[in-house]
Structure formats: structure tokens, C-alpha cells
Amino acid sequence: MADHRRHPPAAAVTGRAGPLAALSLFTVLPVPRRDTAPGPRVVLWMPPVGAVLGVLGALPALLVWHGPGHGSPLLAAALLEAAVALLTRGLHLDGLADLADGLGSRRPPEQARAIMRRSDIGPFGVLALLLVLLVRVTALAAVLSSAGPAAGFAAVLTALVTGRIAVVAAAGEPASPGSSFGALVAGGTGRAARLAWLCAGPPLGAAGRLLTGGGPAGAGWTAAAVCGALAVAAVLRRHAVRRLGGVSGDIFGALVETATTVVLVVLAGEHAWR
């Protein structure tokens, strides 16, 4: 997704938009090479990819949690974050760091975009990564210690899916100048498809919470967490588009990480107040 991992322009014409293309583009999972070139509507499959990442990423965390003495919730949360980062090649974290450097520079749009295309990470990017990962690991550990592994698993799935719904919502924005991935997906999804995912997010999160024994109050809190995360992502998206002239792979990655973090923080806050 990050702009330095570019795809040929022909993909916008001949590419596919199915689950295999999404898994091939957004994860390291081995998929058949046939029909995996990304097409303009590939972002519509990002939320299901988030669910897959949640299931696979939770495996090492659950092994630690179910060890002798139930292990450490903090270690389980850290292992889950590490697993998801490995499964995605740190793609979205890279986008978060690049966007933080670009916006933090307070340079004109063209110069800010040039900063984001650099291969190194500046001080704003390092700070953004440290804060997001620290907050997210701590929040997930709080959920695990307060509500147990089932609620923690539901929280992870909700957070990872919500982060990718934020990208679907942003796919209707114009592409940032020079962004190959932004040009690939900008305008490639219809308004109805974007609204469908936005409307489905809160009920899906609430249903997952009910299935793990959260009750009506927990389901309502989870739906509110999804809505809040998508609202925060929308504010970030509008600011980034205004500053940079459109969306890019880095902006999409930052939206994933931001919305994911907000969901986990809100859910951790629920268990702190109840």
C-alpha cells in the first residue's frame, strides 16, 4: 500500500478486485498467483482481510494466554501486534510513519509529499509509531486482563476490520499527485459500496461482542467504539487530503492504524469504567 511499493499502471485496467488480490497485496500470505493483480475495487476486500489477520494474529497471543498461570496479558498483546505487523510486512505502520513525517514537516504540499516518499523515517514518524504501538498494546492488555481472551479476540477483530473500513470510506477521495496506489483505487468504488461497509461496521462489532458474552451494554459500547474510530479517521483523512492534495497509500495506511487504535482505546476505557 505504501507508495514506494508501486504497482504498474496497467493494473488499474486489467487487475482483479477479489479476495486473492487483496490477500496478495495487503498480507504476506501465500496465494495462487493467478488473478491476483490488484484492481480499483480491491479495497472493498480489506475488511475481510482484517478479519483474517485478526484470527491468525491472535494465535500466538492465545498460546501465551493459555499457558501455565494464564501468562501475561501484556505479553499476549505485544505478540499479537508483532504477528499482525509481520503478516502485513509493516505496510500500514510504514504509511503511518510517512504521513506523520509529511504532516509534521509543515511544508508545502509538494515538499511534504517528497518527504513521505523518502525511504527513511524522520522524528515525527518514529514518535507516531512508538505512541501508537505503546497505546495499542496497553489497551489490548487492559481488555484481556479485565474481560478475558474471548472479549480480547472480539476486540481485535473489531479493531482490525474497522481500520480497513476507514480505508474503504477514503477510496472516494481524489488521488494525491504522484501516488500510484491512490490513482489505482481513487474513484474505483461506488458510493453505495462505501456506505454499505460504513453502515455494516457498527452492527458487526456489536454482534461480535454479543457472541463473546458482552451483553447489550457491551455491544452498544463496541458499536460506539466503531463509530468513534471511523469519525476520527474521517477527520484525519480530510486534513491529510487538504494538506497533500488527495489520498495515497501512506494515508490509507495511517487510517488503518489510527482507526484500529481508537477502537482498542475505547474498549479498554469501557472495562476501566465498568
Image (cartoon, rainbow, N blue to C red):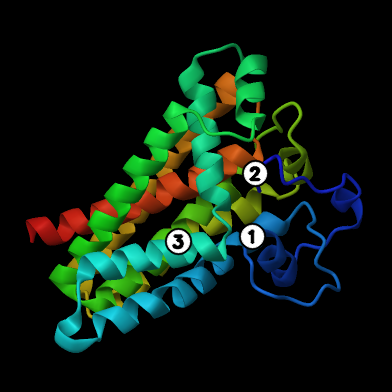
**SS type, badge 2:** loop
Camera sees residue 212: no
Q: Residues within 10 Å of mark 2 (few under 14, many from 20)?
A: many
- Residue 16: x and y in percent read 82, 63
Quarter of the image where one finds residue 232: top left
Which amino acid type is shown beneath numbered disc 1? Answer: Phe
What secondary structure is found at the residue carrying circle 3? helix
Q: Are marks 2 and 1 in contact (CB under 8 Å)?
A: no
The image shows residue 178 at horizontal and vertical percentages of: 76, 29
* Badge 3 vs badge 2, beta-carbon distance below 8 Å: no
First in sequence, mark 3 or 2: give its number.
2
Q: Is residue 143 visible?
A: yes
* Residues at marks 3 and 2, CA–CA distance in whole angstroms: 18 Å
Which one is nearer the viewer's eye here, 89 or 161? Answer: 89
Q: Which residue is mark 2?
A: 2
How many marks the image carries: the answer is 3
**Identity of the residue drawn at 53% across and 32% down:** 99
Mark toward the viewer: 3 or 1: 1
Q: CA distance from mark 3 to mark 1?
A: 13 Å
Q: CA distance from mark 2 to mark 1?
A: 10 Å
Q: Amino acid at mark 3?
A: Leu
Type of residue at label 2?
Ala
Residue position for label 3: 160
Against 26, residue 148 (above or below) is: below
Asked which quadrant contains residue 23, the reply is bottom right
The picture places residue 193, in percent across and down from the top left corner, at 64, 56
Residue 21 coordinates in the image, percent (x, y): 74, 65
Q: Name the residue: 53% across, 33% down.
A: 121
Find disc 1 in the rendering and name its residue.
Answer: 26
Decide if residue 170 is on the left or right side of residue 153: right
Callout 1 secondary element: helix
